[in-house]
Amino acid sequence: MSPSPARRASSASIWKAARWHGASGAGLWRIVQAADDRLLVQTADAFVSLQAATGKVLWRHDAPGMLDGVLQQAAGGSPLLYAKREQKGPGDYLARLVWLDSKTGKVQGSSPLDGFHGDWLGLGPMVAHGGRTWCLAGMTPRPAPDAWAPMLPERSILEIR
């Protein structure tokens, strides 16, 4: 029994994608958006816009220290919102939100999350509804030098305004 036409088409599409998987760089994590014959993908340390038909790289935005928080507005919409960590001092990191134009890869703005810093930061996933945005957020302050056990992060729901 041969596979259905839909299954054959699906297999062909997957194979086509597999042929240009290296175009995005190492550590492909997820597809963030598919719109206008473009795929916006997240790698371990960047966002990459690819031409869907060929895999040609249209632009790349390096994002070292990226956290799990990524939010794409409506399909084809802009901007993309993501979170990253920046070193504030030895063993102390600050969370920063970055708005990225998903069509060009250019930064439209960024803002630190004041008061949200520590040795370990977690921010994400993000969700939006009715003009409001929330994310799961957690941080671990630096433990006292004589602490015998690692501190577990306390997590909260954070509304981003």
Image (spheres, grey):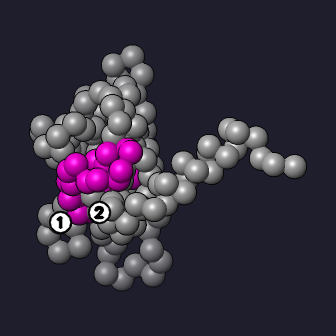
Does residue 8 appear anywhere in the picture?
Answer: yes
User: With 33 as the anchor, is 110 left or right in this view?
Assistant: left
- Disc marking residue 142: none
Q: Residue at x 31, y 81 (%)?
A: 145
The spot of residue 111 in percent (x, y) is 15, 42
| Residue span colored magenta | 49-70
Does residue 117 appear anywhere in the picture?
Answer: no
Residue closer to the observer: 32 or 36: 36
Query: Magenta: predominant secondary structure element?
Result: strand
User: Which tag, 1 or 2, sits closer to the chain's start?
Assistant: 2
Secondary structure at badge 1 equals strand
Q: Quadrant of the C terminus?
A: top left
What's the amino acid at mark 2? Asp
The spot of residue 10 in percent (x, y) is 62, 45
Q: Is residue 4 above or below residue 56?
A: above
Q: Residue at x 24, y 38 (%)?
A: 102
Q: Is residue 26 above or below residue 32?
A: below
Mark 1–mark 2 distance (CA, rounded to whole Å): 16 Å
The spot of residue 136 in percent (x, y) is 43, 43
Give the image quarter of residue 87: bottom left
The spot of residue 37 in percent (x, y) is 35, 36
Query: Mark 2 sits on what residue?
Result: 45
Residue closer to the observer: 51 or 30: 51
Q: Residue at x 20, y 59 (%)?
A: 62
Query: Mark 1 sits on what residue?
Result: 87
Secondary structure at badge 2 equals loop
